[in-house]
Amino acid sequence: MTTAAPQPEKPTLEDVRSRKDRPTGSTHFGDADFGEEEVTDIGEATWSEVATACCVHDAKGWAIIFVGVCAALFFLYFFLFSLELLGNAAKVLGGCSAGGLLSEKTNPVAALVIGELATALVQSSSTTTSIVVTLVGADAVNVKSGIYLIMGANIGTSVTNTIIAMGQMGSGDQLERAFAGATVHDLFNLLSVAVLFPIELATNYLYALTNAMLPSSVGKGDKWKGPLKIIVSPLASRVLKANKDVIKETATKKVESCDAYYPTVCVDGIEDYKHCVACDKEAGEVCKVGLITCDKKTGCPAFFQNGATKQDDATSGGVCLFLSLVLLLICLMGLVNVLQRGLMGMSTRVIYKATKVPGVFAIAIGAAITVLVQSSSITTSVLTPIVGLGVIQLEQMLPLTLGANIGTTVTGLLAAGVSGKVEALQVALAHLFFNLTGILIWYPVPFMRRVPLEGARALGKWTRRSRSIPPIYVVVVFFIIPLLLLGLSELFQQDTVGFTVLGALICVFVVYAIARFVWWWKKQEGREKFLAVLDKRQVMSECKATLPEDMQYLKAKVEQLVEHTGLPEDEEEGVEVEMEAVKVVDEEQPSDASTDEVPIVAAATTEDKEE
């Protein structure tokens, strides 16, 4: 009696790891083909499915969610702490340079570049904006120059989240999505400046618009501190606290240079706020602090020292910059890992439905979050790894970053309120209307919106071919090109025929080079050639990485071949003996001996071996 062959078991839902095996055709987090899904492939879920995925769990599921939320909040707090520490360290290292840059009275192009470089140095557009508003309020910078400085700050603020995206280089899929999510902010700001900067040069549009809106006077208000600063700043201030007054006073020319703040002095050598910062100077007490200062509530930070020199503070800033980057990377990895585990098995249809909100609401959400945290860099830096995981699509990231651009203008408006100057308010309003105008140009019309989206998506895909794209992009876009523009603009400021002609020739050469590059890129298959070079480098890198394993594999296959064909194993030893004999004879022959004798001796040795 024959028995029927057992039927293969059908895979359960837990065993399915591809959308091709699901009846709904939906992709879940953790699928092998998760990275292959396009936005157009994501199906439409119902709100009932969203509610079920969100709220229907057993006791074990709720316990896991609770632990996951606690772990995510833990890593998020120290992620924000490391961003705060990174900003403080950057201000300590680049504060004097940023203050010196902002104090320069230059042409519009130089002002634009200086605003970008200063923001990249201090890692905070809020700080740059506040300083520019203060400078205008103190009549150190005129309103028109302040507007160009603010435009530059808008570009520089996007460097932070681009650096954060590089923290996801461990996964090609995540790096592609995260880098695209970061650079969509960069491209929007660059495109807005590319359009509005020449318009402002030609028409003074922002200056005229904000001037018509100004009141006759501005009352002084109190400084407002966001809730996130209240939570994160105390711990960061215990490690390192940057002295923003150094940047402002250097920029306003109250002091000639940062050397005036050194060495630091505390009354009676006691390191606290009262003896180092708020001493009674009318009573003859002498105290001063440099780039690192003390906090009124938390006291002097760990890296503050009495009698410190400028070099000491710079060393402390460098150490804290390194520590903050390491902590930032650790927290980023932990946060991404926790979110990945929490989302494992979740359908992208459900996530997309939950996060898909109208663009106007997304802009409002981004603005509200940024007002609370008082930093667009923090908002976009937190969103970037979430985009890398695929939770937020690139199309949703764009309006959120636009909202962050609007929210960050609140800092300038608050600084203008504190200054009590009409001119300061005008610059702050120009910042607001610059961002609003950029949004009106690049977001409402679909084909205009696709320009930053497709550009960011292309940059993200390039990271698949080479991991060196992100660092090269950061260095070129945020430092090399601005410095070249700054040097070029300075040539025209020398008021000499020679420098002016030289500058004009360089401009002609640059225009020709750009036109030639565009022609090569579009008409001579430049793009395909560039991508082919990246592909070749990627293949070589993968070959080098797998070379040891490939050699072991080939060695094992050769051994199998020897066993299968019956080749004698001592042939390889004979060859080795022959080569050794040749080497020995080579060494023993005198320098004037004939080289013809060597093969005779080697042959004789081989014959002896065979006998």
Image (cartoon, rainbow, N blue to C red):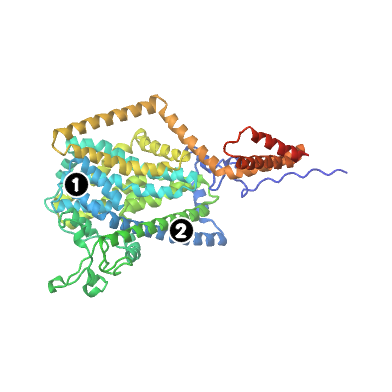
- Of residues 302 and 430, the one drawn nearer to the viewer in this rendering: 302
Question: Residue 181: image x %, image y %?
Answer: 40, 44
Q: Amino acid at mark 2?
A: Ala
Exactly how many numbered labels are in the figure? 2
**As drawn, 291 above or below 399:** below
The answer to whether residue 32 is above or below residue 257 is above
First in sequence: mark 2 vs mark 1: 2
| Residue that mark 1 sits on | 146
Which quadrant of the structure image shows residue 546?
A: top right
Q: Which mark is residue 72?
A: 2
> Residue drawn at (39%, 39%), measured in percent from left and top?
456
Image position, residue 580 (x, y; %): 65, 42
Percent of width and height locating residue 198: 22, 35
- Left or right: 398 with respect to 98? right
The N terminus is located in which quarter? top right
Residue 588 coordinates in the image, percent (x, y): 62, 42
Q: Amino acid at mark 1?
A: Gly
The kind of secondary structure element at disc 1 is helix
